[in-house]
Image (spheres, grey):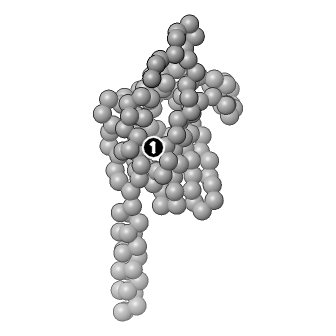
Amino acid sequence: MLRVSFSFFSAAGLALLLGGCGHALTSIPGFQAAAWRADTYACRGQRAVLLPPLLAARASLYEARADDVTALLGQPDEEELQANTEKVYYYYLTPGPQCGPRRPHAAGPRLSLHFGPLGTVTEVLADPLPSQAGQPPKAG
């Protein structure tokens, strides 16, 4: 009986320890999460416009849990599994070949969120966006 109690408390302690890693990510001021989620693979061409508030709040993404990132941004367009239970979520930022049949991998600009072994964001990267045709690049 003592052994069963110890196992129960050990499992409960481990769950509490692992569940306490990272932080919740409910919303980001000025970021239109619903519009981002609706623009899967960036095929509607909205994500590039929606990106600035997300990058301005980049610090709030660090240590966020994968489930919370998925709730905010939607399922990633692509996911890469790496060694030691690390993974990367990719979200396309502009329309491209990934919008075609079978959703082929494309080399277009993406938002990359790297998750460490604890399942929390460790790095946030955004590829440069191409300048709009006919418009001068924004200064600064």
Q: Name the residue under label 1.
A: 70
Q: Residue 8 or 46: which is nearer the viewer?
A: 46
**Residue at point 36%, 44% (across, down):** 60
Kindly state the secondary structure of the residue where label 1 is placed.
helix
Please state the horizontal and vertical placement of residue 31, each as a whole percent of the image: 36, 31
> Which corner quadrant of the image does residue 73 belong to?
top left
Residue ranking furthest to the front: 140
Does 55 appear above or below 17? above
Residue ranking furthest to the bottom: 2
Please state the horizontal and vertical placement of residue 98, each as a whole percent of the image: 64, 28
Please state the horizontal and vertical placement of residue 110, each as a whole percent of the image: 57, 33
Q: How many numbered circles does the render carry?
A: 1
Res 71 visible: no
Please state the horizontal and vertical placement of residue 109, each as a whole percent of the image: 59, 30
Relative side of 70 to 105, left or right:
left
Q: Residue 60 or 81: which is nearer the viewer?
A: 60
Residue ranking furthest to the left: 29
Relative side of 111 to 106, left or right:
left
Graded by Cα atoms within 10 Å as few (under 14), some (14 to 19) or many (20 or more), the crowding at tag 1 reads: some
Q: What amino acid is at disc 1?
A: Thr
Q: Residue 140 or 58: which is nearer the viewer?
A: 140
